[in-house]
Amino acid sequence: MFKKTIYQLLNVFFLLIFTDCSPSSEKINVTAKKQAINLQQDKENRKINDTSALEHLLIQQNLININSLDSNIRVVLHYSTANNFLNKPLYDGLTNCYLPCEVALKLCNAQYYLKSQFSNYNLVIFDGVRPLKIQKQMWKELNIPLKQKVKYLANPNELSLHNYGAAVDVGIIGNNDLLLDMGTPFDFFGEISEPKKEIKHIENGLLSKEALSNRILLRTVMTKAGFRMITSEWWHFNSDTKASAAAKYKLIE
Ligand SMILES: [Zn+2]
């Protein structure tokens, strides 16, 4: 009898886990439900799209190509090109953004909330999953004072949520296919990037009201979808705490 009860409890536990990221979950809004139906399509795309060793690794880890769920979300991975703080490509030519299923669905919801307000706007992903070996390379090669470095880059010894695909760096593409002004570009290592200093920079004129309202729009749709902002980078959003990411997702080495 006791064994049976334990078995039933375990059954409920696993059902809860798998239902969390299934298309039939009540937690996921209608748009994400529709998009999740394309999971089969994603599996087929995986066979076609594995163009690099890194992409192959991400597919093996069962991460989902975000564009298989929502083709309108734009993906511009700065670390795949030389347009980043190390001025060289780090991602083996990767052009797709792969995320754990649960994180990908949250991002689809954020996109849904954004388009509910501005139908011609789209989220743009600057970075998603970031293998730990790349985190180590960034940490080693980024030559700025440590005090500043820790603000904008996670020490690989402490891991980053990006290493699980449990954090995303995002902006918004608006009318005429242009990035909305957020006051700084992505990965600008300076105080104006920091949400906690926004009031100060509005007062001293370094941050415009328009840029602030664009940041607030981004934050509103991301937090409504279950992400959490951080106080040092307007573009970075966490899907989980480190403890929950470690429990739920694979560390991408
Ligand atoms: Zn980030």
Image: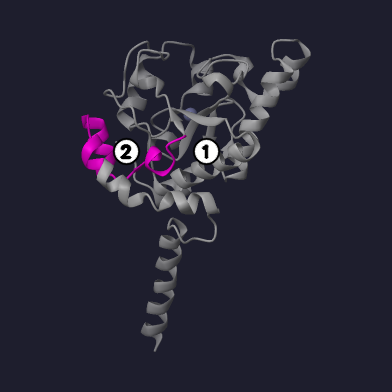
Crowd class of label 1 (few under 14; some 14 to 19; many from 20; radius 10 Å): many
Q: Which residues are magenta?
A: 46-72
Q: Is residue 236 magenta?
A: no
Where 137 falls versus 113 (above or below)? above
- Drawn side of residue 43 relative to residue 212, left or right: left
Crowd class of label 2 (few under 14; some 14 to 19; many from 20; radius 10 Å): some
- Drawn side of residue 190 relative to residue 211, left or right: left
Residue located 57% across and 30% down the image:
121
Q: Amino acid at mark 2?
A: Ile
- The disc, 1 or 2, on the residue closer to the chain's N-terminal end is 1
- Disc sitting over residue 180 in the figure: none
Residue located 31% across and 20% down the image:
90
- Drawn side of residue 221 relative to residue 96, left or right: right
Between residue 217 and residue 17, name the one nearer to us: 217
Q: What residue did someone put label 1 on? A: 238
- Disc sitting over residue 252 in the figure: 2
- Residue 225 in view of the camera: yes
Q: Amino acid at mark 1?
A: Asn
Between residue 32 and residue 205, name the one nearer to us: 32
SS category of the residue bearing label 1: strand
